[in-house]
Structures are given as structure tokens and as C-alpha cells.
């Protein structure tokens, strides 16, 4: 689970830097279009 925790820490840092509300809104948008294949991974950001 340590490999996954590193990704989670990166996601948390992005959420803190961009604002938690904005981050959650992005997640909801991704969930709304999860049927498409044009989703940019969070790691790229």
C-alpha cells in the first residue's frame, strides 16, 4: 500500500495547492465523464 500512498500524497498536495473545493469539483466532473476515454490522469497535472 506504500506505492498507492505516494500517489495519494501527491493528490492531497494538488488538492491543497489548487483548493479542496476545486479539486472535488474536478473529481465530480471526471466521474460524470468516466464513460469516455479522454480523461487526463491526475499525475500529469
Image: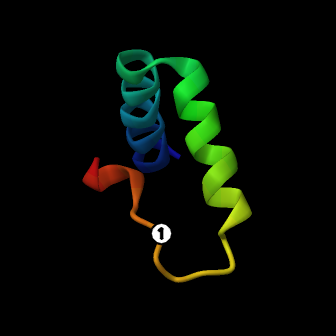
Q: Residue furthest left?
A: 44
SS category of the residue bearing label 1: loop
Residue in the image at 54% along x and 28% along y: 22
Label 1 CA crowd tier, 10 Å (few <14, some 14–19, many 20+) = few
Rendered location of residue 20, percent (x, y): 55, 20
Tell me: residue 45, above or below residue 22. Answer: below
Rendered location of residue 21, percent (x, y): 60, 22
Residue in the image at 46% along x and 25% along y: 15
Q: Quadrant of residue 11?
A: top left
Rendered location of residue 28, percent (x, y): 69, 47
Judge by depth and name the residue closer to the eye, 14 or 30. Answer: 30
Tell me: residue 10, above or below residue 21. Answer: below
What residue does disc 1 label? 39
Residue in the image at 53% along x and 46% along y: 1
Left or right placement of residue 38 versus residue 24 in this view:
left
Rendered location of residue 25, percent (x, y): 63, 37
Tell me: residue 20, above or below residue 26. Answer: above
Left or right placement of residue 8 versus residue 17 in this view:
right
Count of labels in the image: 1
Tell me: residue 10, above or below residue 28. Answer: above
Amino acid at each position: 500500500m506504500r506505492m498507492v500512498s505516494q500517489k495519494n500524497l501527491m493528490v492531497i498536495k494538488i488538492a491543497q495547492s489548487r483548493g479542496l473545493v476545486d479539486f472535488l469539483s474536478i473529481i465530480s466532473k471526471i466521474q460524470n465523464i468516466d464513460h469516455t476515454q479522454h480523461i487526463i490522469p491526475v499525475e500529469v497535472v
